[in-house]
Image (spheres, rainbow, N blue to C red):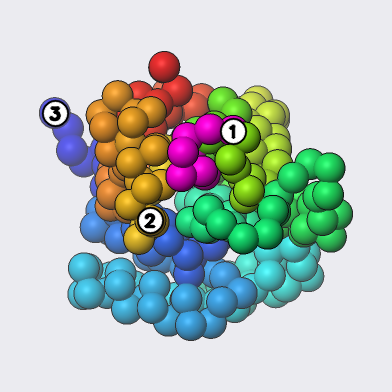
């Protein structure tokens, strides 16, 4: 096996949603194979913790952070120009940012219903998940195309290829007992990302830019035991993913190891979508 095809030395990766749950893990995986890392988010504390996490795992890594709202095109252009002045071109774009509310409450007032959906939330979900993702592709992907090389990795969700099973959000496992529904905006955004993935893959293929998508399943993150059990019962591997388990998949998609792959989707959901 030629492991040199995974080598990312000399390349710079920009990760949106870098201060969230998986952003630092993507950074760790890419840094382990030599990439310089740029984490962006609107959460300053999250970015600080993310940088510390990457460096705790890869002390020799280069990690830059920037507080940037990805729905602000001008701010993204300023970041691009600043990085260029510092000698960095984005070779790898990881579109990871999204609004994804925690679903660990089973009692109290009803929320997330279609009939009473908060339209301000809907607009914000679309802006961050789709408009923000597109703007990052537009600004950084177009620069890749001009240079004749680059990779974009879109982080979708198993809810892009199947409907959320709302029954997991009740103590009884019955739809009639669900009070807090998974908001519709999240699966809509992640489904739309698949269309964006295919479009850009064909649009920039002749320019040497590859665009692929990772479809992860649910990640263990201090959820209530009852929710963990409900989800695990629906997964052939009988568990949720550890947050570290997607690192190598992101490296594969970002590196020359996947050089003949574009417009595709890798599903890593413990088998949940095959049932």
The front one of 198 and 142 is 198
Packing grade of label 3 (10 A; few <14, some 14-19, many >=20) is few
Instruction: Answer whether residue 32 is magenta in the image.
Output: no
Taking the spot 43% from the left edge, 81% from the top edge, the residue there is: 48
Q: Position of residue 248 (x, y in %)?
A: 28, 43
Taking the spot 64% from the left edge, 27% from the top edge, the residue there is: 198
Taking the spot 84% from the left edge, 60% from the top edge, the residue there is: 120
Q: Quadrant of residue 59?
A: bottom left
Mark 2 vs 3, N-terminal side: 3
Q: Secondary structure at mark 2?
A: loop
The answer to whether residue 238 is seen in the rendering is: yes
Q: Is the C terminus in the top left, top right, bottom left or bottom right quadrant?
A: top left
Mark 1 vs 3, N-terminal side: 3
Q: Secondary structure at mark 1?
A: helix
The residue pinned by badge 1 equals 175
The residue pinned by badge 3 equals 1
Question: Between tags 2 and 3, which lies in front?
Answer: 2
Q: Position of residue 99 (x, y in %)?
A: 63, 57
Taking the spot 51% from the left edge, 25% from the top edge, the residue there is: 264
The residue pinned by badge 2 equals 224
Q: Position of residue 129 (x, y in %)?
A: 67, 51
Instruction: Answer whether residue 171 is magenta in the image.
Output: yes
User: Start and end of the magenta stretch?
Assistant: 168-175
Q: Secondary structure at mark 3?
A: loop
Q: Quadrant of residue 36?
A: bottom left
Question: What's the distance in space between the residues labelled 1 and 2, CA to CA?
Answer: 18 Å
* Residue positioned most to the left: 1
């Amino acid at each position: 096996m030629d492991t040199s095809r995974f080598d990312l030395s000399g390349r710079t990766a920009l990760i949106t949603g870098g201060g969230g749950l998986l952003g630092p893990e993507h950074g760790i995986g890419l840094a382990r194979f030599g990439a310089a890392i740029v984490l962006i988010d609107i959460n300053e504390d999250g970015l600080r913790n993310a940088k510390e996490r990457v460096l705790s795992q890869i002390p020799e890594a280069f990690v830059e952070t920037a507080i940037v709202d990805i729905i602000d095109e001008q701010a993204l252009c300023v970041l691009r120009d600043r990085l260029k002045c510092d000698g960095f071109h984005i070779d790898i774009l990881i579109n990871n940012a999204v609004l994804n509310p925690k679903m660990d409450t089973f009692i109290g007032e009803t929320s997330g219903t279609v009939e009473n959906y908060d339209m301000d939330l809907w607009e914000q979900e679309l802006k961050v998940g789709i408009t923000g993702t597109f703007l990052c592709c537009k600004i950084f992907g177009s620069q890749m195309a001009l240079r004749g090389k680059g990779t974009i990795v879109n982080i979708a969700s198993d809810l892009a290829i199947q409907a959320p099973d709302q029954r997991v959000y009740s103590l009884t496992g019955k739809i009639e007992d669900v009070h807090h529904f998974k908001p519709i905006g999240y699966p809509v955004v992640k489904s739309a990302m698949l269309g964006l993935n295919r479009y850009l893959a064909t649009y920039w293929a002749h320019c040497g830019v590859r665009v692929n998508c990772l479809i992860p399943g649910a990640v263990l993150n201090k959820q209530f035991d009852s929710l963990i059990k409900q989800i695990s019962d629906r997964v052939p591997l009988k568990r949720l993913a550890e947050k570290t388990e997607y690192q190598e998949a992101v490296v594969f998609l970002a590196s020359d190891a996947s050089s003949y792959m574009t417009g595709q989707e890798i599903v890593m959901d413990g088998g949940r979508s095959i049932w």
